[in-house]
Amino acid sequence: MTREGLKSLISSLFVCAVVIISITPAFTYVVVQPLIIESRLVTFGRYAFASEAIDSIAEDESPSVVGIGSSMMYKAFDGKCMEELSGVENSKFYNLAIPASRPYTDMMQIPRLSSSGTDVVLVEVGSNLLFQMSEGPNEYLEFRFTVQTMIQENADLGAWTEIVLPYHQKWLYLNEYERTVARQEWFVESNEIILERLFDLEDEQDIDFRFLPEPGSNEWLDYLQRPGWPASVIDNEWKRKMSMDEYNETVLMKRSNFEPLEHGTRNHAALEYIISELIEADIEVVLVGMPHHPHKYPYLDPGQWDGYNHTLENLAETYDVAVVDFTWQEKEGWVNEHFSDGNHLDDEGRDEFCERMTPLLDSLLES
């Protein structure tokens, strides 16, 4: 059969698939959700992998630790390293942090995480996360809310839906009818991918670290502990060409854009919701302030990160949580070799984070 003939066949099969939608709406979930995880419908399946990941963790009866947060936690948390260093038998450490995430989006996964049987959760509290949400267009927020709620269930709903601002509520799918309609919008492209794959017409994409393995596979469980990370920005060859001194002076040695607020934002409300729900589920909570490159600190304005300081203090006073503040109190010992850029750790930094965090996590698992 010619390529044109295959395209015609694909079109015909697609029409049949549309008919199937009207008969069995739940079929859309079976088709769409795996392709989202595979990074075929979105640029990075990790943006919507939380539900599958938590379900896999819930099936494991081992003592478990989960880390959630932004790209700073994502690039710091090496669950395999922690497992190897841990003195707690059969303990598992899972990295569920998501690049560009913030408490306002992390809160969507809390009902499922609270019922997963997880023992300890690391919650990132950072100078990069404590900002006010705007009413204007926000493609990232729209994407996270729509994709995540599209593949959720009623059991994933909770008080977090009340924290979502009125002008973001339109991006939430809060019942099965809305979820089905939303998935139908993705069904067209999904079937094209499936049929192209069936007839060996799919173009392979080089997605490198963005690739997520099939949920339930051995590779999937390994991925949940050690997801793989992009190459260090500082170590990249093209950065070497501009010389480390030039890179330091033009990129690192300048004022930080982070201006955390002390209270009153929906990120603060989300943090309080996350912490209280986890504690209510008898899960130990560790609030973690992430480290920053040592060159960043001299260029902070006086009091620029006071909002972060007050937030962490208030949360520690209000809730029964452990606190690890690598941003200030325990920032000593973090050096250039630990960082991929001004705010993210690299391979050496992950080892350092692992060595510093694992003894505390062991003590919480044993308590």
Image: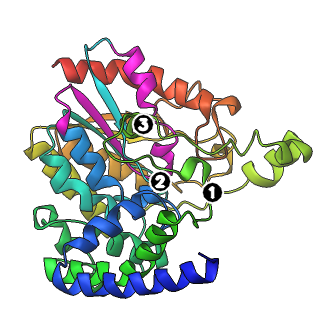
Which residue does the image show at 22% across and 78% down from the upper left?
179
Closer to us: mark 1 or mark 3? 3
Q: Check the image and report above or below for 106 versus 77.
A: below
Residue type, mark 1 in image: Ser
**Which residue in the structure is indicated by mark 3?**
219
Instruction: Say which of 184 and 198 sits in front.
Output: 198
Q: Which residues are magenta?
A: 59-86
**Which residue in the structure is indicated by mark 2?**
127
The mark nearer the N terminus, 3 or 2, is: 2
Instruction: Say which of 188 and 307 sits in front.
Output: 188
The answer to which image quadrant residue 49 occupies is bottom left
Q: Is residue 200 left or right of residue 270?
A: right
Q: Are marks 3 and 2 in contact (CB under 8 Å)?
A: no
Magenta includes 75?
A: yes
* Quarter that holds the N terminus: bottom right
Residue 256 shows which numbered tag?
A: 1
The mark nearer the N terminus, 2 or 1, is: 2
Q: Check the image and report above or below for 339 versus 51.
A: above
Local SS, label 1 = loop
Local SS, label 3 = helix
Dot 1 crowding, Cα within 10 Å, few <14, some 14–19, many 20+: some
Instruction: Say which of 252 and 55 sits in front.
Output: 55
Magenta includes 269?
A: no
Residue type, mark 2 in image: Ser
The mark nearer the N terminus, 1 or 3, is: 3
Residue 296 shows which numbered tag?
A: none
